[in-house]
Image (cartoon, rainbow, N blue to C red):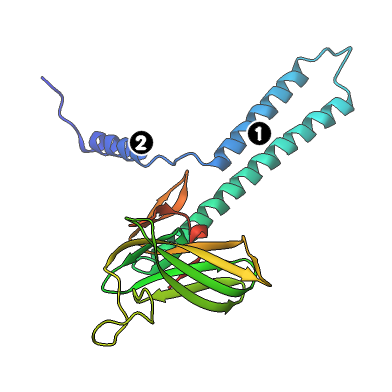
Amino acid sequence: MTSPITSSTATSDISSLQATMNAKAKTAEDGVQADTDKFMTLLVTQLKNQDPLNPMDNAQMTSQLAQLQTVTGVNKLNTTLESLKASYQSSESLSATNLIGHGVLVEGNGILLSKSQAILGVELESPADKLQVVVVDKATGKDVAAIDLGEQKAGIVPVAWDGVADPNNLDADGKPVVLADGNYTFRVIATRAGEQLTDAKTLSFDSVASVTTNGKDGVKLNLPGKGAVSLTDIKQVL
């Protein structure tokens, strides 16, 4: 006949099970202590088994202890750096989530004209006497509009475009002709003292849809048009 399970036995089994399930995970500090214990064990064993007629001299002892301190210090430094990295990623992820739903400017030359409205931008590393944006029909590759922005300082220049190709080209009602909604591209012509600048970059408008975080790639912002980008790729938040 099977022996009945007593309350003390059940309590013991539950305690063992809880101890197993709630076992403390090993940390980097545990690893440092384990390495230190192994080192000291080897050193003590070496001392116990050394030749009495030719014992380890003080220089050797000091050298090995110095090695122990060096290894311990490096391990602790690595632990601290990993902790700081995790804290930074957590803070970066929290900041990134605040951008969800916001419009941003990133490197690119695409324009989406919707309801006769579009946003684009230019990044100037040096000031320009004259700045012009040339809009190109993506389907035909032909220039269809030119936006004169005049003199601009170095930095980010956001541009709002109403789809007008030429302000002087009027329809029957006397209003400027507006291009059809759709996809366009653009290029930048920036000059200073009559010479064209080579440090002007085109910026496309996009929006932050979501945020992805992982240990390998860090924090990534997911944009519908551009795809996954890092926080440093964002030139301006609108």
Mark 1 or 2: the one toward you = 1
* Image spot of residue 77 (x, y percent): 65, 46
Q: Is residue 189 left or right of residue 100?
A: right
Disc number at residue 20? 2
Q: Which residue is drawn at 83% across and 12% down?
A: 51
Q: Which residue is drawn at 85% across and 14% down?
A: 52
- Establish if 67 lies above or below 48: below
- Kind of residue indicated by mark 1: Thr
Q: Under tag 2, what secondary structure? A: helix
First in residue order: circle 1 vs circle 2: 2
Quadrant containing the C terminus in the rendered view = bottom left
The residue most toward the bottom is: 174
Q: In this view, does 145 lie to the left or right of 45?
A: left
Q: Which residue is drawn at 35% across and 79% down?
A: 169
Q: Residue at x 34, y 58 (%)?
A: 210
- Establish if 74 lies above or below 42: below
- What residue is disc 1 on? 36
Nearest the viewer among 21 and 161 is: 161
* Image spot of residue 113 (x, y percent): 31, 68
- Establish if 130 lies above or below 142: below
Q: Is residue 121 left or right of residue 64?
A: left
Nearest the viewer among 96 and 151 is: 151
The alpha-carbon separation of the residues under discs 1 and 2 comes to 26 Å
To which quarter of the image does residue 162 belong? bottom left
- Kind of residue indicated by mark 2: Thr
Say few, some or many: other residues with alpha carbon within 10 Å of mark 1 (under 14 / 14 to 19 / 20 or more): some
* Image spot of residue 134 (x, y percent): 46, 66
To which quarter of the image does residue 43 belong? top right
* Image spot of residue 165 (x, y percent): 36, 73
Disc number at residue 101? none
